[in-house]
Amino acid sequence: MSLYREAGRTGRGGLIAAAVVLVIGVGTGYLIGHANTKESSLQDAISKLRSDLAPVSNGLELLGGEYPQGVRNGKIVARTEYDGSLSSVERIRAVAAVHADELQELNPKLASRLSETLEHLQRAVASKESTGMVDRLRNRAANELEKILPGT
């Protein structure tokens, strides 16, 4: 029996240990690589939703300029601007309705409140409410959307 091993020869224990280390390393790498997949896909979905809802934010902002030009004291003073206000609020509601389920998943309470606010806003514009009332509803809708999706 030799006290020394021959060079280049490894025992079975060394091969088994190397295989175990390799399996652990591959498994750990896989877990690390896929650990953030769920989170990043959620972030991607939220980013896409934020982008898809940009017409809502833009429409609310546009409405703030159109409506006061179109309506004063409950009377239409500029038909084009008033018609633009009606179109803007209809587009806002349509886009929000398309994404209602996604908004509900993120924050059911605020999503319902946003839907109600947009409905009130549309009625206020249609009935030629005061600019102050329309602005309050516009700002409320913008704040609710911002709370659901910060950065919109």
Image (cartoon, helix red, strand yellow):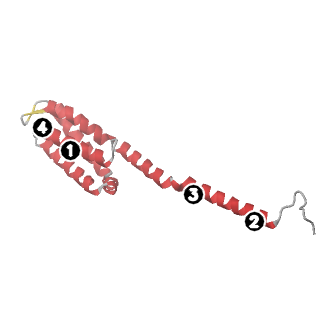
Please say if the residues under marks 1 and 4 sit with CB atoms less than 8 Å apart. Answer: no
Element type where label 3 sits in the image = helix
The image quarter containing residue 23 is bottom right
| Disc 3 to disc 2, C-alpha distance | 22 Å
Q: Nearer the viewer, mark 3 or mark 2?
A: 2
Q: Nearer the viewer, residue 4 or 85?
A: 4
At a point 25% along the width and 47% down the height, the residue shown is 144
Q: Nearer the viewer, mark 4 or mark 2?
A: 2
Please say if the residues under marks 4 and 2 sit with CB atoms less than 8 Å apart. Answer: no
> Nearer the N terminus, badge 1 or badge 2?
2
Q: Residue 16 bears which disc, if any?
A: 2
Three-letter code for the amino acid on which mark 1 is drawn: Arg
> Nearer the N terminus, badge 3 or badge 2?
2
From where the camera sits, is residue 90 visible? no
- For label 3, the crowd category at 10 Å Cα-Cα, with few meaning under 14, some 14 to 19 and many 20 or more, is few
From where the camera sits, is residue 117 visible? yes
Please say if the residues under marks 4 and 3 sit with CB atoms less than 8 Å apart. Answer: no
Q: Residue furthest bottom?
A: 1
| Disc 1 to disc 3, C-alpha distance | 43 Å
Please say if the residues under marks 1 and 2 sit with CB atoms less than 8 Å apart. Answer: no
x and y, in percent, of residue 151 in the image: 34, 41
| Disc 1 to disc 4, C-alpha distance | 12 Å
At a point 22% along the width and 52% down the height, the residue shown is 113
Q: Residue furthest front?
A: 3
Q: Which residue is mark 1?
A: 140
Q: Residue 31 bears which disc, if any?
A: 3
- For label 4, the crowd category at 10 Å Cα-Cα, with few meaning under 14, some 14 to 19 and many 20 or more, is few
Three-letter code for the amino acid on which mark 3 is drawn: Leu
> Nearer the N terminus, badge 1 or badge 4?
4
Q: Which residue is mark 4?
A: 132
Three-letter code for the amino acid on which mark 4 is drawn: Gly
